Every structure is written in structure tokens, then in C-alpha cells.
Image (cartoon, rainbow, N blue to C red):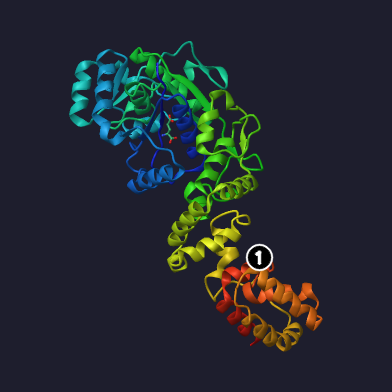
Amino acid sequence: MSVRVRFAPSPTGHLHIGTARTALFNWLFARKEKGTFILRIEDTDLERSKKEFEVSILDDLRWLGLDWDEFYRQSDRLSIYREIAEKLLSEGKAYECFCTKEELEKLRGKGYDRRCLKLSEAEKETLRKERKPAIRLYVPKDGETRFNDYLHGELCFQNNVIDDFVILKSDGTPTYNFSVVVDDIDMRITHIIRGEDHISNTPKQIHIYNALGIETPIFIHIPMILGQDKAKLSKRHGATSIGEYRSMGYLSEAMVNFLALMGASYNDKQVLSLEELVEIFSLENLSKNPAIFDIKKLDFLSQEHIRRKSIEALTQLTIQFLKEKRLEHWTIDKSYLTRVLSILQTRIKTLKDVIIMGDYFFTEEFSRDVEIPIEEKKRLNYILPELVDALNKVDDWNATNLENKTRTFIAEKMLDSRWFLQSLRIIISGKKVTPSLFETLEVLGKEKTIDRIKKGMD
Ligand code: GLU
């Protein structure tokens, strides 16, 4: 039997780190097993579901490189849920419930007392004229429900803690557990890989499988992602959505690699592309221990994946990123951008670092993280005009010539070379740290270099 898995996000928010990791594990498993990866939008909660979130989730999945083979939207399938609920009704495995909100409110904490199960046909007929009924599943009160989770082993739940829960609401929409099971059956899902937070839903879902007389798929509940403080990952730990990391300039390769390492291990291999992950992925890589979110690891992976990029690919990604940041005017001279990136590539952790660390290549309004003290400025004002003269004489503007010229100048003027070169760096870039100074000047070009030194004297 070929593997069929699904990723089933609810479009009630942007794609979260934890949800994206669930998507990734399902996708990796499907691709590794040459199976089918299904994307199913679970939008039956009409109040909380928003089209814009569906669009944004799809966009983030594409960005991560997770393509899908089949696509479904639960709101397009309402008649199917109704049909199955009616089937259960006709077989006596479910029953109509006419209770009002107020009546149910009174039962709160006590559990549903099956009062509607006792209604006669005549009573139901009368009530049907007043209101539409919900449909409840008849859940056995005694015994227990067991299932084998791939990671957690056998889990056992007492049946008496589960009420006859609603499967179809009076407005005709299914409840979450019901639509999930109907779809998982209809879509012939073989493995359910999802977050541990769904374990408590599983016994309810198994009651639905039982009522329909269908065997359950294999359940694999993966551990939650926790912050460094071991609390469930949330906003207060920082950015939690994929979109936020994308906007911070992390490469999708790094994000995928990072997600794949949370709650799984691959023979100590760390830096892995999506293709490499498909190659080595197996359910046996998954761990049942909670995964800890470590931003330093993401930074490390991001830097590594940037290094692995060809300069052409990095240029293309940077152009895209700068456009998103409304800095398209930095991308007009593509070969200049490529030259800048060739000296920044080994230093940046994210595409945003191109802006933070390399703004001086593109604009005169670059940020300054250091200023030269006023006394030193006075000294420099005597020296710099002569440096300008010397640099003006450099015809072949390359790092070697620039270094020779500048070092000769330093020797002749008997300057403290560390001090002078660092001052020059700050004048040119506003930064304490840059790529090698002479390479920087080479890329920046003669005109801009001389211009900045002159400005530095004002
Ligand atoms: N729609 C559910 C969620 O977003 C997932 C359902 C499932 O995987 O069974 O949490």
C-alpha cells in the first residue's frame, strides 16, 4: 500500500513554526516513500477561518519548497460530512440532539445526559418544526479505547470520560474531529503525522472510525516545540511564524533544515538540504522528546546555507529580498551587487545582513555604528587630502594596488597603520567591521571611495 499523508492546517493564522514542521515531516515521509502528500485546508470554523490566511499558508509552503500532490478545502466538502452523519444516524450510531444553548449550559461540567436519545419519533417531529437538530455520536460508556502511537506506544483512554459529542452542528457544519476522520478515510490516509497536542482528540476520532467500521491509520504524534525555558513556544519567545523569519532574511533552505532537526536526528548530520533530507528521512529519525527552539542554531544553519549558494543564486535571492524591502534601486546594477555579495557572502547570516552590514555599498545614507573622535578627525584632516592625491593616481583600481599605495603612504607619513586603516574603514563605511578594507575599496570603486574620504574631511 503506498503512503498517503496529509497536512491539514486551519487557516486561522499565519503558518507557525510548529505547524510548518508538521508539514515538513509529512512531506519528507511522502517524498521518501514515493507516496502522496495531500494539503487539506480545514476551514469549517467559519468564524475564525480567513481566506487571507489560507493564501499566506500556501505561499509559505511554496517558499519552503513543500509542494503538494492533491488539494482539498473542507468548506467545499460540507455535503460529504452531512451524508456520512446521516448514514450514522440511519444506522443508529448517532442521534439527533435538539437541546438549546441554554439547556446545554445547565449541563455544563456534568456531561451530556443523553436526554435527546430518549425522545420519541413524535416528540422529534414536533421539535424539528421549531429548530434544526445537531447530530451526536453514540459513544459507549464502558470499556476503554486503546491505540498504538508510533512514538508513544500504546495509549489507553477510559470511554466514560467521553461524552456523546456533536459531529454535525445544527447549522449543518461538521465539528473538527468529524471532518478530520471523514476526510482521512475518504482520502485514504495511511499515516497521520501531527502534533502531540492532538493526542487527546485521537480517542474521539477512533470512536468515529469504530462507528463507521473502518480501521484506523497509523498515528504518529510528534513532540511540541518548546522555548529555551521549556515552556511551549509562543510569541513571548520571539517570532513564531514562518513569514517573520522569511522577512528577517533567513534562507528557506536554512528554515527547512532547522525545522527538520527539531525533534529528529540524522546520524549527527546537521547541515542538510531538502534533497539530502528526503534521502535520509525515516520515521525512525523522529524522537518523542520535546524539541527545543534554538535561534543560534538557525543562525548557524543560515550562514552555512548562504555559503553553499553559488554567487548567481545568492544574487538572485538578494534581488528578490531587496525588492520585498523596497530597496529595488539597490539592485539595478546587478554585476555591482554580485561583486558586493562576493565579499559579503562568508560574513552574512541572513539576507537582511546585506542591508545591515553592507548598506554603505549602496547609499550615502548608510548607518554609522561608530564615529571618529573630534581630536582624531582634526589630525585626519591634515593627512587625508594627501591620501586623496595618492589614490587619485591609482589607475588600475584593485585591492593589491590600493594596498600597496596606501601602505607606502602610511610608511612615508610615519602613521600608526592600525589607527589609520581603521579610521579609513569608518569613514568609508561607518562600521567597525567590514570585509578586508582594500577589497571593500575595490568593490566600492574609485569615485565613491575618493568622494567619501573628501566628505570625511568636512
Ligand atoms: N487542523 C488541525 C490543526 O490545524 C490539524 C488536524 C490534524 O492534523 O488532525 O491543528
- The answer to whether residue 321 is seen in the rendering is yes
Position above or below: 337 against 213 = below
Give left or right: position of 202 versus 372.
Answer: left
Camera-nearest residue between 241 and 458 = 458
Q: How many marks?
A: 1
Give left or right: position of 394 versus 172.
Answer: right
Q: Which quadrant of the render holds ligand 1?
A: top left
Instruction: Please provide percent x and percent y for residue 346.
Output: 62, 54
Q: Is mark 1 within 8 Å of ligand 1?
A: no
Position above or below: 100 against 96 = below
Give left or right: position of 110 versus 83.
Answer: right
Residue drawn at (65%, 84%), measured in percent from left and top? Answer: 388
Camera-nearest residue between 248 and 130 = 248
Indicate the secondary structure of the residue bearing disc 1: loop
Give left or right: position of 44 versus 223.
Answer: left
- The answer to whether residue 12 is seen in the rendering is no
Residue drawn at (50%, 46%), measured in percent from left and top? Answer: 252
Instruction: Please provide percent x and percent y for residue 204.
Output: 43, 22
Q: Quadrant of the N terminus?
A: top left
- The quarter of the displayed image where residue 448 is located: bottom right
Position above or below: 443 against 166 = below
Q: Local crowd at mark 1 within 10 Å, few (<14), some, or many (≥20)?
A: some
Residue drawn at (43%, 67%), measured in percent from left and top? Answer: 332
Q: Quadrant of the C terminus?
A: bottom right
Three-letter residue code for mark 1: Thr
Camera-nearest residue between 48 and 143 = 48
Q: Which residue is mark 1?
A: 434
Camera-nearest residue between 66 and 167 = 66
